Protein backbone atom coordinates (compact mmCIF):
# COMPACT_ATOMS: atom_id res chain seq x y z
CA UNK A 1 0.00 0.00 0.00
CA UNK A 2 1.35 3.42 -0.96
CA UNK A 3 1.60 5.54 2.18
CA UNK A 4 4.00 8.20 0.85
CA UNK A 5 1.18 10.58 -0.05
CA UNK A 6 -0.36 10.23 3.40
CA UNK A 7 3.03 10.78 5.05
CA UNK A 8 3.61 13.96 3.07
CA UNK A 9 0.12 15.19 3.96
CA UNK A 10 0.66 14.53 7.69
CA UNK A 11 4.06 16.27 7.54
CA UNK A 12 2.53 19.26 5.75
CA UNK A 13 -0.27 19.48 8.33
CA UNK A 14 2.26 19.41 11.17
CA UNK A 15 4.33 22.14 9.53
CA UNK A 16 1.24 24.29 9.05
CA UNK A 17 0.25 23.73 12.69
CA UNK A 18 3.74 24.71 13.89
CA UNK A 19 3.64 27.82 11.71
CA UNK A 20 0.22 28.82 13.08
CA UNK A 21 1.48 28.27 16.63
CA UNK A 22 4.45 30.55 15.95
CA UNK A 23 2.03 33.38 15.07
CA UNK A 24 0.43 33.23 18.53
CA UNK A 25 2.75 35.70 20.35
CA UNK A 26 2.39 38.34 17.63
CA UNK A 27 -1.39 38.00 17.58
CA UNK A 28 -1.56 38.32 21.37
CA UNK A 29 0.52 41.51 21.22
CA UNK A 30 -1.77 42.96 18.53
CA UNK A 31 -4.85 42.06 20.57
CA UNK A 32 -3.63 43.71 23.77
CA UNK A 33 -2.44 46.89 22.00
CA UNK A 34 -5.72 47.47 20.13
CA UNK A 35 -7.95 48.47 23.05
CA UNK A 36 -10.75 51.01 23.65
CA UNK A 37 -8.35 53.99 23.78
CA UNK A 38 -6.91 52.99 20.39
CA UNK A 39 -10.41 52.77 18.91
CA UNK A 40 -11.24 56.19 20.33
CA UNK A 41 -8.13 57.81 18.84
CA UNK A 42 -8.65 56.25 15.40
CA UNK A 43 -12.35 57.20 15.45
CA UNK A 44 -11.43 60.82 16.28
CA UNK A 45 -8.79 60.92 13.54
CA UNK A 46 -11.29 59.76 10.94
CA UNK A 47 -14.18 61.93 12.12
CA UNK A 48 -12.06 65.10 12.27
CA UNK A 49 -9.65 64.65 9.34
CA UNK A 50 -11.25 62.09 7.03
CA UNK A 51 -8.78 59.86 5.17
CA UNK A 52 -5.94 62.39 5.14
CA UNK A 53 -4.04 60.79 8.04
CA UNK A 54 -4.21 57.15 6.95
CA UNK A 55 -0.50 57.31 6.13
CA UNK A 56 0.39 57.40 9.83
CA UNK A 57 -1.02 53.86 10.18
CA UNK A 58 1.70 52.65 7.79
CA UNK A 59 4.40 54.47 9.77
CA UNK A 60 3.11 53.02 13.04
CA UNK A 61 3.02 49.46 11.64
CA UNK A 62 6.62 49.70 10.44
CA UNK A 63 8.04 50.91 13.77
CA UNK A 64 5.90 48.58 15.89
CA UNK A 65 7.10 45.65 13.80
CA UNK A 66 10.72 46.74 14.23
CA UNK A 67 10.45 46.65 18.04
CA UNK A 68 8.30 43.50 18.30
CA UNK A 69 10.74 41.75 15.96
CA UNK A 70 13.62 42.90 18.17
CA UNK A 71 11.86 41.61 21.30
CA UNK A 72 10.97 38.32 19.63
CA UNK A 73 14.59 37.73 18.62
CA UNK A 74 15.70 38.48 22.18
CA UNK A 75 13.21 35.88 23.40
CA UNK A 76 14.46 33.31 20.86
CA UNK A 77 18.17 33.98 21.45
CA UNK A 78 18.18 33.94 25.25
CA UNK A 79 17.28 31.28 27.80
CA UNK A 80 16.10 33.90 30.28
CA UNK A 81 13.48 36.63 30.40
CA UNK A 82 14.03 40.16 29.13
CA UNK A 83 14.12 41.56 32.68
CA UNK A 84 16.64 38.87 33.67
CA UNK A 85 18.84 40.06 30.80
CA UNK A 86 18.36 43.69 31.87
CA UNK A 87 19.30 42.66 35.43
CA UNK A 88 22.42 40.95 34.07
CA UNK A 89 23.52 44.02 32.10
CA UNK A 90 22.48 46.92 34.36
CA UNK A 91 21.73 45.50 37.81
CA UNK A 92 18.78 44.45 39.93
CA UNK A 93 17.56 47.98 40.79
CA UNK A 94 16.96 48.84 37.14
CA UNK A 95 15.10 45.56 36.52
CA UNK A 96 12.87 46.12 39.56
CA UNK A 97 12.18 49.74 38.56
CA UNK A 98 11.11 48.65 35.07
CA UNK A 99 8.89 45.87 36.40
CA UNK A 100 7.16 48.12 38.95
CA UNK A 101 6.81 50.92 36.38
CA UNK A 102 5.17 48.63 33.79
CA UNK A 103 2.85 47.19 36.46
CA UNK A 104 1.72 50.67 37.57
CA UNK A 105 1.09 51.79 33.99
CA UNK A 106 -0.94 48.63 33.25
CA UNK A 107 -2.90 48.89 36.51
CA UNK A 108 -3.61 52.58 35.86
CA UNK A 109 -4.93 52.08 32.34
CA UNK A 110 -6.85 48.91 33.24
CA UNK A 111 -9.81 51.00 34.44
CA UNK A 112 -10.33 52.19 30.86
CA UNK A 113 -10.38 48.59 29.61
CA UNK A 114 -12.89 47.57 32.32
CA UNK A 115 -15.14 50.53 31.56
CA UNK A 116 -14.85 49.90 27.81
CA UNK A 117 -15.85 46.24 27.96
CA UNK A 118 -18.68 47.03 30.40
CA UNK A 119 -20.10 49.83 28.24
CA UNK A 120 -19.89 47.75 25.04
CA UNK A 121 -21.98 44.88 26.44
CA UNK A 122 -24.32 47.21 28.37
CA UNK A 123 -25.10 49.18 25.20
CA UNK A 124 -25.70 45.96 23.27
CA UNK A 125 -27.99 44.45 25.90
CA UNK A 126 -29.45 47.62 27.49
CA UNK A 127 -28.37 46.45 30.93
CA UNK A 128 -26.30 48.12 33.74
CA UNK A 129 -22.63 48.81 32.98
CA UNK A 130 -21.41 47.89 36.48
CA UNK A 131 -22.96 44.42 36.19
CA UNK A 132 -20.85 43.66 33.11
CA UNK A 133 -17.69 45.14 34.54
CA UNK A 134 -17.98 42.68 37.44
CA UNK A 135 -19.00 39.68 35.31
CA UNK A 136 -16.34 40.13 32.62
CA UNK A 137 -13.53 40.74 35.11
CA UNK A 138 -14.58 37.60 36.99
CA UNK A 139 -14.48 35.70 33.69
CA UNK A 140 -11.01 37.13 33.04
CA UNK A 141 -9.77 36.07 36.48
CA UNK A 142 -11.35 32.60 36.11
CA UNK A 143 -9.20 32.00 33.00
CA UNK A 144 -6.14 32.03 35.27
CA UNK A 145 -7.29 28.77 36.84
CA UNK A 146 -6.80 26.83 33.60
CA UNK A 147 -3.81 24.52 33.79
CA UNK A 148 -2.26 25.93 30.63
CA UNK A 149 -3.16 29.61 30.81
CA UNK A 150 -0.98 30.51 27.81
CA UNK A 151 -2.87 28.16 25.47
CA UNK A 152 -6.19 29.56 26.72
CA UNK A 153 -4.89 33.13 26.35
CA UNK A 154 -3.70 32.46 22.81
CA UNK A 155 -7.01 30.93 21.71
CA UNK A 156 -9.09 33.69 23.29
CA UNK A 157 -6.96 36.43 21.75
CA UNK A 158 -7.15 34.84 18.31
CA UNK A 159 -10.92 34.49 18.69
CA UNK A 160 -11.27 38.14 19.78
CA UNK A 161 -9.15 39.29 16.84
CA UNK A 162 -11.50 37.34 14.56
CA UNK A 163 -14.49 39.03 16.25
CA UNK A 164 -12.94 42.48 15.77
CA UNK A 165 -12.03 41.82 12.15
CA UNK A 166 -15.53 40.53 11.40
CA UNK A 167 -17.15 43.56 13.04
CA UNK A 168 -14.93 46.11 11.31
CA UNK A 169 -14.99 44.46 7.88
CA UNK A 170 -18.79 44.18 8.03
CA UNK A 171 -19.07 47.84 9.05
CA UNK A 172 -16.66 48.83 6.27
CA UNK A 173 -18.72 46.94 3.67
CA UNK A 174 -21.85 48.67 4.95
CA UNK A 175 -20.16 52.08 4.75
CA UNK A 176 -18.82 51.34 1.22
CA UNK A 177 -16.18 54.14 1.05
CA UNK A 178 -14.60 55.41 -2.17
CA UNK A 179 -11.24 53.81 -2.97
CA UNK A 180 -9.44 56.81 -4.55
CA UNK A 181 -9.51 59.10 -1.45
CA UNK A 182 -8.38 56.18 0.73
CA UNK A 183 -5.42 55.48 -1.57
CA UNK A 184 -4.56 59.18 -1.54
CA UNK A 185 -4.62 59.26 2.28
CA UNK A 186 -2.33 56.22 2.46
CA UNK A 187 0.18 57.31 -0.19
CA UNK A 188 0.26 61.11 0.12
CA UNK A 189 1.28 62.30 3.61
CA UNK A 190 -0.34 65.49 4.86
CA UNK A 191 -0.57 67.35 8.18
CA UNK A 192 -3.96 69.02 8.58
CA UNK A 193 -3.99 72.02 10.91
CA UNK A 194 -4.60 71.07 14.53
CA UNK A 195 -3.92 67.36 14.00
CA UNK A 196 -0.49 67.14 15.67
CA UNK A 197 -1.63 66.04 19.14
CA UNK A 198 -3.89 63.31 17.78
CA UNK A 199 -1.06 62.07 15.52
CA UNK A 200 1.28 61.94 18.53
CA UNK A 201 -1.36 60.09 20.57
CA UNK A 202 -1.94 57.58 17.76
CA UNK A 203 1.76 56.84 17.19
CA UNK A 204 2.42 56.62 20.94
CA UNK A 205 -0.43 54.11 21.37
CA UNK A 206 0.47 52.13 18.24
CA UNK A 207 4.23 51.91 18.74
CA UNK A 208 3.73 50.36 22.17
CA UNK A 209 7.20 49.61 23.52
CA UNK A 210 5.71 48.01 26.63
CA UNK A 211 3.58 45.76 24.42
CA UNK A 212 6.54 45.03 22.16
CA UNK A 213 8.82 44.02 25.04
CA UNK A 214 6.21 41.48 26.17
CA UNK A 215 6.71 39.72 22.83
CA UNK A 216 9.95 38.25 24.20
CA UNK A 217 8.02 36.67 27.10
CA UNK A 218 5.30 35.32 24.81
CA UNK A 219 7.85 33.77 22.46
CA UNK A 220 9.51 31.95 25.36
CA UNK A 221 6.13 30.87 26.77
CA UNK A 222 5.19 29.45 23.38
CA UNK A 223 8.55 27.59 23.26
CA UNK A 224 7.89 26.05 26.68
CA UNK A 225 4.40 24.92 25.68
CA UNK A 226 5.34 23.69 22.18
CA UNK A 227 9.11 23.02 21.94
CA UNK A 228 8.78 22.00 18.29
CA UNK A 229 7.13 25.24 17.14
CA UNK A 230 9.01 27.07 14.38
CA UNK A 231 9.99 30.53 15.64
CA UNK A 232 11.48 33.47 13.79
CA UNK A 233 11.89 37.13 14.60
CA UNK A 234 9.53 38.03 11.75
CA UNK A 235 6.60 35.97 13.11
CA UNK A 236 5.11 39.07 14.72
CA UNK A 237 4.52 40.68 11.30
CA UNK A 238 1.10 39.05 10.82
CA UNK A 239 -0.17 40.30 14.17
CA UNK A 240 1.16 43.83 13.64
CA UNK A 241 -0.30 43.93 10.12
CA UNK A 242 -3.71 42.98 11.55
CA UNK A 243 -3.27 45.71 14.17
CA UNK A 244 -2.73 48.24 11.38
CA UNK A 245 -5.66 46.92 9.34
CA UNK A 246 -8.05 47.31 12.29
CA UNK A 247 -6.85 50.87 12.90
CA UNK A 248 -7.25 51.75 9.24
CA UNK A 249 -10.76 50.25 9.01
CA UNK A 250 -12.03 52.20 12.03
CA UNK A 251 -10.48 55.41 10.66
CA UNK A 252 -11.96 54.82 7.21
CA UNK A 253 -15.46 54.17 8.60
CA UNK A 254 -15.30 57.38 10.64
CA UNK A 255 -13.82 59.29 7.70
CA UNK A 256 -16.47 58.09 5.24
CA UNK A 257 -19.53 58.69 7.42
CA UNK A 258 -18.80 61.20 10.18
CA UNK A 259 -16.25 63.55 8.58
CA UNK A 260 -18.49 64.67 5.63
CA UNK A 261 -21.31 65.37 8.10
CA UNK A 262 -19.14 67.28 10.58
CA UNK A 263 -19.80 64.79 13.39
CA UNK A 264 -17.03 64.54 15.97
CA UNK A 265 -16.62 61.76 18.54
CA UNK A 266 -14.94 61.62 21.94
CA UNK A 267 -15.24 57.88 22.65
CA UNK A 268 -15.52 54.66 20.66
CA UNK A 269 -19.09 54.33 21.99
CA UNK A 270 -19.91 57.72 20.42
CA UNK A 271 -18.71 56.26 17.12
CA UNK A 272 -21.23 53.40 17.32
CA UNK A 273 -24.08 55.81 18.14
CA UNK A 274 -23.05 58.13 15.29
CA UNK A 275 -23.29 55.29 12.76
CA UNK A 276 -26.89 54.42 13.73
CA UNK A 277 -28.69 57.33 12.00
CA UNK A 278 -27.00 56.44 8.70
CA UNK A 279 -27.10 52.63 8.71
CA UNK A 280 -29.50 51.64 11.49
CA UNK A 281 -29.10 49.80 14.75
CA UNK A 282 -27.28 46.87 13.14
CA UNK A 283 -24.30 49.04 12.20
CA UNK A 284 -24.14 50.39 15.76
CA UNK A 285 -24.35 46.82 17.13
CA UNK A 286 -21.58 45.64 14.81
CA UNK A 287 -19.28 48.42 15.95
CA UNK A 288 -20.09 47.69 19.61
CA UNK A 289 -19.17 44.03 19.02
CA UNK A 290 -15.82 45.25 17.70
CA UNK A 291 -15.46 47.49 20.78
CA UNK A 292 -16.19 44.51 23.03
CA UNK A 293 -13.50 42.46 21.29
CA UNK A 294 -11.00 45.31 21.63
CA UNK A 295 -11.83 46.00 25.28
CA UNK A 296 -11.89 42.37 26.46
CA UNK A 297 -8.64 41.48 24.69
CA UNK A 298 -6.98 44.56 26.23
CA UNK A 299 -8.52 43.72 29.62
CA UNK A 300 -6.86 40.29 29.67
CA UNK A 301 -3.68 41.15 27.75
CA UNK A 302 -2.87 44.34 29.67
CA UNK A 303 -3.30 42.56 33.02
CA UNK A 304 -1.16 39.62 31.86
CA UNK A 305 1.61 41.98 30.77
CA UNK A 306 1.61 44.00 34.01
CA UNK A 307 1.42 40.97 36.29
CA UNK A 308 4.12 39.01 34.46
CA UNK A 309 6.70 41.80 34.41
CA UNK A 310 6.19 42.73 38.07
CA UNK A 311 6.54 39.09 39.15
CA UNK A 312 9.67 38.74 37.03
CA UNK A 313 11.22 41.93 38.41
CA UNK A 314 10.68 40.67 41.97
CA UNK A 315 12.30 37.33 41.18
CA UNK A 316 9.03 35.37 41.31
CA UNK A 317 9.35 33.97 37.79
CA UNK A 318 7.73 34.88 34.50
CA UNK A 319 5.93 31.69 33.47
CA UNK A 320 2.19 32.14 33.18
CA UNK A 321 1.72 28.89 35.11
CA UNK A 322 3.48 30.36 38.19
CA UNK A 323 1.15 31.23 41.10
CA UNK A 324 2.73 34.67 41.87
CA UNK A 325 2.31 35.66 38.20
CA UNK A 326 -1.36 34.65 38.22
CA UNK A 327 -2.01 36.50 41.50
CA UNK A 328 -0.47 39.71 40.16
CA UNK A 329 -2.43 39.40 36.89
CA UNK A 330 -5.60 39.08 38.96
CA UNK A 331 -4.53 42.12 41.02
CA UNK A 332 -4.33 44.27 37.87
CA UNK A 333 -7.84 43.16 36.83
CA UNK A 334 -9.31 43.77 40.29
CA UNK A 335 -7.67 47.21 40.52
CA UNK A 336 -9.05 48.25 37.13
CA UNK A 337 -12.54 46.93 37.93
CA UNK A 338 -12.73 48.76 41.28
CA UNK A 339 -11.63 52.07 39.75
CA UNK A 340 -14.08 51.69 36.84
CA UNK A 341 -16.96 50.91 39.22
CA UNK A 342 -16.15 53.79 41.59
CA UNK A 343 -15.50 56.46 38.95
CA UNK A 344 -17.29 55.10 35.88
CA UNK A 345 -14.21 55.80 33.78
CA UNK A 346 -10.47 56.36 34.06
CA UNK A 347 -10.02 59.38 36.42
CA UNK A 348 -7.96 62.30 35.12
CA UNK A 349 -5.57 62.03 38.09
CA UNK A 350 -4.85 58.41 37.20
CA UNK A 351 -4.25 59.31 33.55
CA UNK A 352 -1.72 61.95 34.66
CA UNK A 353 -0.08 59.44 37.02
CA UNK A 354 0.16 56.76 34.33
CA UNK A 355 1.42 59.29 31.79
CA UNK A 356 4.18 60.46 34.13
CA UNK A 357 5.44 56.90 34.63
CA UNK A 358 5.19 56.11 30.93
CA UNK A 359 7.29 59.15 30.00
CA UNK A 360 10.28 57.73 31.90
CA UNK A 361 9.76 53.96 31.56
CA UNK A 362 9.01 53.62 27.82
CA UNK A 363 12.19 55.28 26.45
CA UNK A 364 14.37 53.25 28.82
CA UNK A 365 12.75 49.94 27.77
CA UNK A 366 13.25 50.92 24.12
CA UNK A 367 16.91 51.79 24.71
CA UNK A 368 17.43 48.58 26.73
CA UNK A 369 15.91 46.37 24.01
CA UNK A 370 17.92 48.13 21.31
CA UNK A 371 21.17 47.68 23.27
CA UNK A 372 20.48 44.00 23.99
CA UNK A 373 19.48 43.28 20.39
CA UNK A 374 22.80 44.81 19.23
CA UNK A 375 24.86 42.73 21.70
CA UNK A 376 26.44 39.87 19.72
CA UNK A 377 27.44 38.00 22.91
CA UNK A 378 23.82 37.75 23.99
CA UNK A 379 22.13 37.54 20.61
CA UNK A 380 24.53 35.53 18.47
CA UNK A 381 23.07 35.10 14.99
CA UNK A 382 19.86 36.84 16.11
CA UNK A 383 21.50 40.24 16.67
CA UNK A 384 20.26 43.29 14.78
CA UNK A 385 21.23 43.54 11.14
CA UNK A 386 22.53 46.86 9.80
CA UNK A 387 19.04 47.68 8.49
CA UNK A 388 17.48 46.91 11.89
CA UNK A 389 20.12 49.03 13.63
CA UNK A 390 19.34 52.01 11.43
CA UNK A 391 15.55 51.63 11.47
CA UNK A 392 15.56 50.78 15.19
CA UNK A 393 17.69 53.85 15.88
CA UNK A 394 15.23 56.05 13.97
CA UNK A 395 12.36 54.45 15.90
CA UNK A 396 14.17 55.08 19.18
CA UNK A 397 14.64 58.76 18.30
CA UNK A 398 10.90 58.94 17.51
CA UNK A 399 10.03 57.39 20.90
CA UNK A 400 12.32 59.76 22.78
CA UNK A 401 10.85 62.75 20.93
CA UNK A 402 7.32 61.60 21.83
CA UNK A 403 8.43 61.24 25.45
CA UNK A 404 9.87 64.78 25.45
CA UNK A 405 6.66 66.18 23.95
CA UNK A 406 4.63 64.30 26.57
CA UNK A 407 6.96 65.59 29.28
CA UNK A 408 6.49 69.18 28.08
CA UNK A 409 2.73 68.67 28.00
CA UNK A 410 2.80 67.07 31.48
CA UNK A 411 4.82 69.97 32.98
CA UNK A 412 2.56 72.58 31.37
CA UNK A 413 -0.45 71.02 33.16
Image (spheres, rainbow, N blue to C red):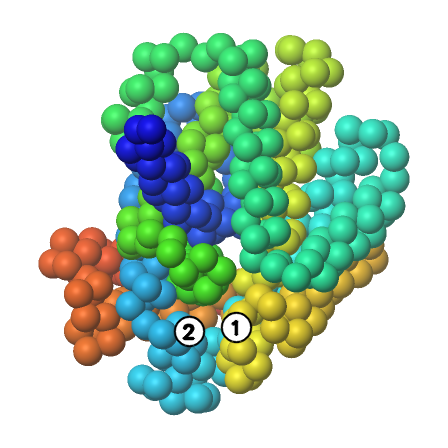
| In the displayed structure image, the side of residue 53 where residue 154 appears, left or right | right
Q: Residues within 10 Å of mark 1 (few under 14, many from 20)?
A: many
Location of residue 74 (image quadrant)? bottom left
The residue where tag 1 is placed is: 318
The quadrant in which the N terminus is found is top left
Residue 61 in the image: state x and y as whole percent. Answer: 34, 42
Location of residue 279 (image quadrant)? top right
Q: Could you tell me which residue is drawn at 39 percent across and 84 percent down?
A: 87
Q: Could you tell me which residue is drawn at 70 percent across and 55 percent down?
A: 143
Q: Could you tell me which residue is drawn at 25 percent across and 67 percent down?
A: 373
The residue where tag 2 is placed is: 81
Judge whether 20 appears above or below 75 on screen. Answer: above
Q: Quick one: label 2 or label 1, which is nearer the N terminus?
A: 2
For the residue pair 381 and 301, the one nearer the viewer reads as: 381
Instruction: Please say if the residues under marks 2 and 1 sit with CB atoms less than 8 Å apart.
Output: yes
The extreme left residue here reads 386
| In the displayed structure image, the side of residue 377 where residue 33 appears, left or right | right
Residue 239 in the image: state x and y as whole percent. Answer: 41, 42
Residue 118 in the image: state x and y as whole percent. Answer: 76, 43
Secondary structure state at the residue bearing disc 1: loop
Secondary structure state at the residue bearing disc 2: loop
Amino acid sequence: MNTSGRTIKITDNRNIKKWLQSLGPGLITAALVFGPSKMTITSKLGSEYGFSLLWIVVIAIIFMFIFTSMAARIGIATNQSLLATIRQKWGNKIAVAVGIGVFLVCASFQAGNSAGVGVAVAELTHTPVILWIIILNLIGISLLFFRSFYKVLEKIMIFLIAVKLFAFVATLIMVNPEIAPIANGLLVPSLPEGSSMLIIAFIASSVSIVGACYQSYLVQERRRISPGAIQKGTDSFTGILILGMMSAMVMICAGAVLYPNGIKVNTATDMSKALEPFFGEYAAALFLIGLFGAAFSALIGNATLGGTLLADSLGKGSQLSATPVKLLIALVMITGAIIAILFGKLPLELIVFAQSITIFIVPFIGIAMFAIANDSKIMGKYKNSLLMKISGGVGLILIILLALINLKDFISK
